[in-house]
Image (cartoon, grey):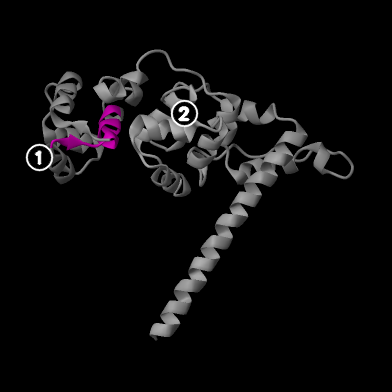
Amino acid sequence: MTLPAKAFQRWLQGIAPDASTADVCRVSGIKRTTLAQQLVRGKVSVSTVVSISRAYNVNPVAALAGFDSYRVLAGPPQPPTRCELVSQISTADLLRAALARPAMDPLGRQGAAPAALSPVPHASSVKNWVDAIDDGEVRHRVSAATGIAPQNYSAQLTANRLSPELAVATSMAAGVGPANGLVATGLITEEEAGWAPGARQEALDSMSDGDLTALVGDRMQALGKVLRRQEQDQAQTEKIWENLG
């Protein structure tokens, strides 16, 4: 979903009343032609607001909450659940953490402490997040609330992406913090969403050996399916080129 240009201009006037369009583009890193095209069309992208917010030291969540379509982001941040936090840990980080557990060593020795967790988002952060909060009906509720066809919603998840509108709608449908989906998509950071520092690591440390190992197994199985599909697509592409050549 884009934001109305008139509402954007009112918001911009409020945070940078004396700044010209050139000034705004220079400090935010947005191309002047990009912003000009959005204003001419009357539709400004959410990412534009996020970039300008950061440039003027305004929390992007608070900035978006000033627009009608994102009013649900207003108010104190709602902490993510443990499942959400764990969903935002990459498969590689989970695997390293599991291998460092004493249960994985034949002699029960503690492995070397794993390195700091990789930043959010990761290669399957969006799909993992939706899977973590889905009670079995979330996808249907999102479809009913937004009008998106279930197959189109699934296609976005397969591509590990969700539009900001759908990310917020998914959060609301699942009853979790409305900004949490924006973290999973990479639009905003954990800090901007009000997540506690080190929250993901604490959630990981709180997992039992059995739960962690089972999760790693599930992630590896899902990764295997993705890799096999990519290999099949590559083989098919090569075959087409061979037939053409």
Residue 238, percent across and down?
47, 76
For the residue pair 15 and 7, the one nearer the viewer reads as: 7
Residue 56, percent across and down?
26, 25
Label disc, if present, on residue 190 of the rendered structure: 2
Q: Which residue is mark 1?
A: 40
Residue 3, percent across and down?
22, 31
> Is residue 44 in the magenta section?
yes
Residue 33, percent across and down?
14, 45
Q: Quadrant of residue 63?
A: top left
**Cβ–Cβ under 8 Å for marks 1 and 2:** no
- Residue 96 shows up from this direction: yes
Q: Quadrant of residue 140?
A: top left
Above or below for 45 versus 11: below
For the residue pair 203 and 58, the one nearer the viewer reads as: 203
> Is residue 14 in the magenta section?
no
Magenta span: 42-53
Q: Dot 1 lies on which element?
A: helix
